Amino acid sequence: MKKLHIKTYGCQMNVYDSARMADVLAPLGYAPVDAPEGADLVILNTCHIREKAAEKVFSELGRLRPLKDANGTMLAVAGCVAQAEGEAILARAPYVDVVLGPQAYHRLPELVARAARGGGAALDTDFPVESKFDHLPVPGAGQGVSAFLTIQEGCDKFCTFCVVPYTRGAEFSRPPADIERDARALVAGGAAEITLLGQNVNAYHGRDAGGAELGLGALVRRLAKIDGLARIRYTTSHPRDMDDDMIAAHADTPALMPFVHLPVQSGANRVLEAMNRGHTAARYLDIVARLRAARPDLALSSDFIVGFPGETDAEFEATLDLIRAVGFAQAFSFKYSPRPGTPASLLDRQVPEAVKDARLQRLQALLKAQQDDFNARAVGAVVPVLYERAGRNPGQMVGKTPWLQAVHAALPETAAGKVLPTRILAAGANSLAGAIPDSNPERLSA
């Protein structure tokens, strides 16, 4: 048996992609291991969103090179940095064996075999005509109680700060029958919760065998009928694609969890226009209001960029005002960093780093206060928690509330995969402490 180590950077879609790369390599005799030492093949599955992403990859390759020199370990770079920097990777790190983009990992066995034959580095960063999903095995067991399932890839929005349209390609939606097949396989393998993934997941428009088009709301309702699938989530959404049917699904589909990640990036309309977001702050607030009308207990998370070129003090304050108006349970926030090849990288009026630093600290302090308040309000309540895995302490299990809060409770490992009513005892910085109020709890359906 050969040993495979995959290091994953970035988003949940990369986590899903890493699992599928392991699936396609399994027939070649590769079994996953937790560390690169002793591995026959190491894959870096990369993300190109954050600043200096390529430099981090080259730094990691430098750390891995001694393994190759000593043991003959094969090195592969996959994902979005590979797509954007393929030739540069081979020029700077000629000891890399395989470089492949995110649309080509179904070809990984062929590329690994070609490199192993000694024919030089194998490079594949094309956007193939065929869908990679048509060449991937159905997901097997071992994905865990909470599993990811990609239903949509690519992006047609072309936000001026983002490289995704260039590294992931145009928007593509998988057929609903294929998604349902994979979802049933994941449930049969032990998954009780599935998170549907896409760069713009609510842009999903798949066609069934009869040619009829389904949006994300219809797809969620279809998947909710799968016996044993207790919870459905989806990420990441775009405000432009949050349609009435998807909002209605939050009201009429109990399996759909009351948590939405809906990036807004800024609360200033001029900045949103410069970002090419295609919505205003008022439009975003209207969507939030309609989501909460459909599901009053719904919680929201978002993404924010501070210091976008030309952002004024007043425009930054508008973002803080939007945050106060919404109230977020979680959020991700970053300083703007120019991504090579994006329109925003060419804009004048770049904001000084010191100003970006100060703004980010204020924004994160506000978001942290909102998150702390959201978690504190759970204390004393009994909520349904899906327990997923053992905790760090003996006799402890970790699970999630419907609102994506981590909960630790004293439970046996047999609780994995069960949704149990749990009283929240305390709120920590990043998780909740809970206890089961009944010594013989029944499994809930939420």
Image: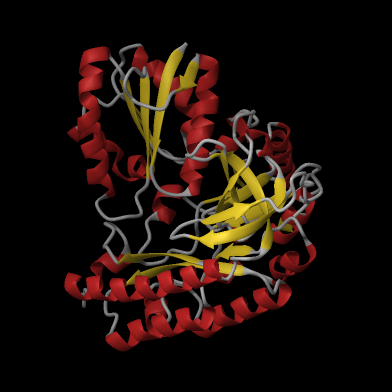
Residue 60 placed where, x, y %?
25, 36
Judge whether 330 appears above or below 164 on screen: below
The quadrant where residue 242 appears: bottom right
Side of 207 relative to 89 (left or right): right
Q: Residue furthest bottom?
A: 314
The answer to whether residue 173 is visible is no
| Picture quadrant of residue 122 | top left
In this rendering, would 410 be left or right of 14?
right
What is the basis of the colouring in this image?
A: secondary structure
- Residue visible at 63% across and 52% down? 435
For image coordinates 27% across by 40% down, the residue present is 57
> Quick one: quadrant of the C terminus?
bottom right
Taking depth in this image into account, of 406 and 204 the one nearest to the observer is 406
The one nearer the camera, 166 or 201, is 201
Q: Is residue 215 visible?
A: yes
Q: Residue at x 22, y 45 (%)?
A: 55
Q: Looking at this view, is 392 or 317 the one in front?
A: 392
